[in-house]
Image (tube, grey):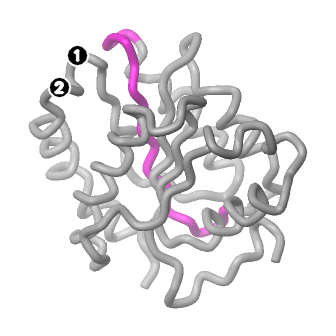
Amino acid sequence: MTAGTADRGPSGGLVVVSGNPRAGSRTLGVAEAVARRLAPALGLPGDAGETVDLASLAPEVLTGSAAVTAARDRVAGARVVVVATPVYKASYTGLLKAFLDGYGPDALADVVVVPVVVSAGPAHALAGEVHLRPVLVELGAVVPARTFAVTEAQLADLGPVLDAWVDRWSATVARATPG
């Protein structure tokens, strides 16, 4: 199966993608927290679902190894994907860009995607809206909610920021999610 042709049958659930080049990053932790909080609103189990930590695939992303193809297929076959990135130079990481570039046109058609960005400060809060959202939409993804943007200072007490975002956007994400 190639990226973008994965079956979205009953197994297509929630997938987390971390575009941070550091394995086990804080970005990954935030993305998994978002997934855990969204899962009940989507009628999915409360765990974070499957995780694609691109740091572990970094040496292979440009060559498109079998592991990278499998990761792309998992993402394309999901009902909902949480795509997270730290903000690098006012945008998302090159690693995430290289991963997304491996998809053809409309490869993420009908996949609901929740963008997540972790930045040093509030000046970069719009990186997800301005840079990441257009790429996801170009790939056919449905992006029904604003990016969950969190600063490094908020990471120590993520709960209130995440609660506010989930309270505002979880029903919107659920309505956009197929079956």
* Residue 162 coordinates in the image, percent (x, y): 19, 42
Disc 2: CA contacts within 10 A as few (<14), some (14-19) or many (>=20): few
Whether residue 24 sits left or right of residue 158 in the image: it is right
Whether residue 68 sits left or right of residue 170 in the image: it is right
Residue 77 in magenta stretch: no
The magenta stretch is 108-123
Question: Is the C-beta separation of discs 1 and 2 under 8 Å?
Answer: yes
Q: Residue at x 31, y 13 (%)?
A: 122
Which amino acid does the dot numbered 1 rest on? Ala
* Residue 53 coordinates in the image, percent (x, y): 55, 47
* Residue 58 coordinates in the image, percent (x, y): 71, 38
Mark number displayed over residue 107: none
Determine which residue is flagged by label 2.
Answer: 156
Q: Residue at x 9, y 37 (%)?
A: 160
Q: Is residue 124 above or below residue 96?
A: above
**CA–CA distance between discs 1 and 2?**
7 Å
Whether residue 22 sits left or right of residue 74 in the image: it is left
* Residue 108 coordinates in the image, percent (x, y): 66, 62
Which amino acid does the dot numbered 2 rest on? Ala
Residue 111 in magenta stretch: yes
What is the quadrant of the N terminus in the image? bottom right
Q: Quadrant of residue 61?
A: top right
Q: Is residue 62 above or below residue 66?
A: above
Q: How many marks?
A: 2
Q: Residue furthest bottom?
A: 10
Check disc 2 and report its element: helix, strand or loop: helix
Q: Residue furthest left?
A: 160
Determine which residue is flagged by label 1.
Answer: 153
Q: Residue at x 30, y 73 (%)?
A: 42
Q: Residue at x 62, y 73 (%)?
A: 77
Check disc 1 and report its element: helix, strand or loop: helix
Q: Quadrant of residue 154?
A: top left
